[in-house]
Amino acid sequence: MPAPIRLRELIRTIRTARTQAEEREMIQKECAAIRSSFREEDNTYRCRNVAKLLYMHMLGYPAHFGQLECLKLIASQKFTDKRIGYLGAMLLLDERQDVHLLMTNCIKNDLNHSTQFVQGLALCTLGCMGSSEMCRDLAGEVEKLLKTSNSYLRKKAALCAVHVIRKVPELMEMFLPATKNLLNEKNHGVLHTSVVLLTEMCERSPDMLAHFRKNEKLVPQLVRILKNLIMSGYSPEHDVSGISDPFLQVRILRLLRILGRNDDDSSEAMNDILAQVATNTETSKNVGNAILYETVLTIMDIKSESGLRGEQKYAPSKRWHIDTIMRVLTTAGSYVRDDAVPNLIQLITNSVEMHAYTVQRLYKAILGDYSQQPLVQVAAWCIGEYGDLLVSGQCEEEEPIQVTEDEVLDILESVLISNMSTSVTRGYALTAIMKLSTRFTCTVNRIKKVVSIYGSSIDVELQQRAVEYNALFKKYDHMRSALLERMPVMEKVTTNGPTEIVQTNGETEPAPLETKPPPSGPQPTSQANDLLDLLGGNDITPVIPTAPTSKPASAGGELLDLLGDITLTVFKVYGHSCVNTTEKVSLQTFQLQLLSPSSSIVPAFNTGTITQVIKVLNPQKQQLRMRIKLTYNHKGSAMQDLAEVNNFPPQSWQ
């Protein structure tokens, strides 16, 4: 049989094809010749044929009939044959095919080969397509190579160990002893792959994370390596645009972020080096920007000292603080953390004297540009809250602009229909439009039309909001001004502090630990505060019964009917004789059936009880938690009491 053509000749021939049909004809002809060659027992051109087959596979043509030939090449003693065989195995085989298990013994033999390049081929193949069975059988060989003094093999063994851990996580502890000396290596390839291995172990196992923090003292080693990279002189081997090995720096910063998260000691150990990286990194090139980006993410994730958060500590004024954050949102709003929006809103709300200035700046910032969604969300919120200040032109900080009510609504409607607006942004805009119904006087009918349109939106969130807002207009219009009044000053939230888990609207969210003493005396309540309380806007705090001057809770009851989100299992009242007893409970994300109380009068001196039953449907198995408001008449005087109930037995909601 004549010698087959070389790979280079095949490529040249295929490229001369003028049509797809002509190319397929050439491929089929060559595949037939390759099949005939494979049938021969003594095939000296097997390596050449498999190489051509891999090229056809890359073009999208079937090449499965060459799988066994790859195994034969792997078993060969020639390095050139092994190289093509392992390459073919990585391209043509995967763990879904049983044929790959036949490679296990060959890979094991090659891992113990005397030539490092053969060992490297075996490590690459195992790290690329090794199944869980193969990883279990060969993990010991990988662990041995991870301890060798050969840098070429150690870097490949580290990446192979990452694949083994992903396939068989319980083998992670096997590689723990080998990681002790990895970071002492001077070879950057070994350092890079070692950091990847350590990152994988820390992400997958909290126990490993704690071990590296406390026992191995990993953070000081990483800080030392990062400092050497920053302070080292020019090295042509690792220099990229004037920065020494930026790839290793980025990997180290990511691992530091994992180690420093929610850990005071680790965060303290890396504060100085993070400040040094942020200060000394050259940002004129993209390479420096990549490092600075990872540095900022690390600073924001760990318990960093306030000195690293310069805009919070060194802000000369609230205006400068607001302008700085707005500038960040304008230039890179799509890349900021999710908490940037509520943090800026809180800052604006608490800066009463800056309301007119801020809403004017935000209005001008989003004119015709909705690409930075966090900025649009903040702008929509502020326009909804302070739209009357925008229209009246009361800004004293800079030259006021002349804006009409219709122009403001045009902007918000444009946000609603923009293709760049996310569902969250549209929710901000719709709520802002609704709030403007109490700030504007000439455009209420237009606002009603906009709200009614979204009552049939395919977005469930927008549809729900629109339906509720329509109900406010139609049935509860007398409550609209109280419901949509301006937000009160928000309490300052501590960042990067210890947190506890609280339940809000059925979702678990971390909240800063904060101990609040109970009020020392009676606190008057207003209708607006009651409404905010029902909407979840106030903290849950026990309140002592107020004086007889408290208002009846009819408006609150109507609001409960509107929201339909009340929950109560069994409620009993002990004490003096009283009449006209009503119960008000505030919880969300539950469906319920409210039954009538057993009586409207409580007998005096604990001689009887009143029982009211509410049947709760809790499909998401959320923990039951509620706030109760009780209004009653005692000896002709109107009384009121607020309480929190959060000690329901688990059997009632699990």
Image (cartoon, helix red, strand yellow):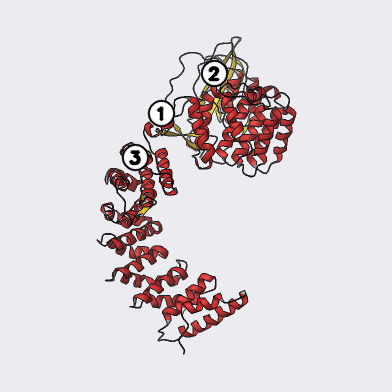
Please state which of the two labelled residues, at mark 2 or mark 3, is closer to the viewer: 3
The residue that label 2 is drawn on is: 641
N-terminal of the pair, mark 2 or mark 3, is 3
User: Which residue lies at the image location 61% right of the left edge and 31% below the top edge?
Assistant: 363
x, y percent for residue 406? 71, 30
* Image side of residue 339 versus residue 593, left or right: left
- Figure quadrant of residue 310: top left
Residue type pointed to by label 2: Asp
Please state which of the two labelled residues, at mark 2 or mark 1, is closer to the viewer: 1
Q: Give the distance between the C-alpha atoms of the residues marked 2 and 1, in whole angstroms.
A: 42 Å
Q: Are marks 2 and 1 in contact (CB under 8 Å)?
A: no
The residue that label 3 is drawn on is: 276
Residue type pointed to by label 3: Gln
User: Which residue lies at the image location 46% right of the left edge and 32% below the top edge?
Assistant: 511
Please state which of the two labelled residues, at mark 1 or mark 3, is closer to the viewer: 3
Q: Secondary structure at mark 2?
A: strand
Q: Secondary structure at mark 1?
A: helix
Inspect this view and state whether residue 623 appears. no
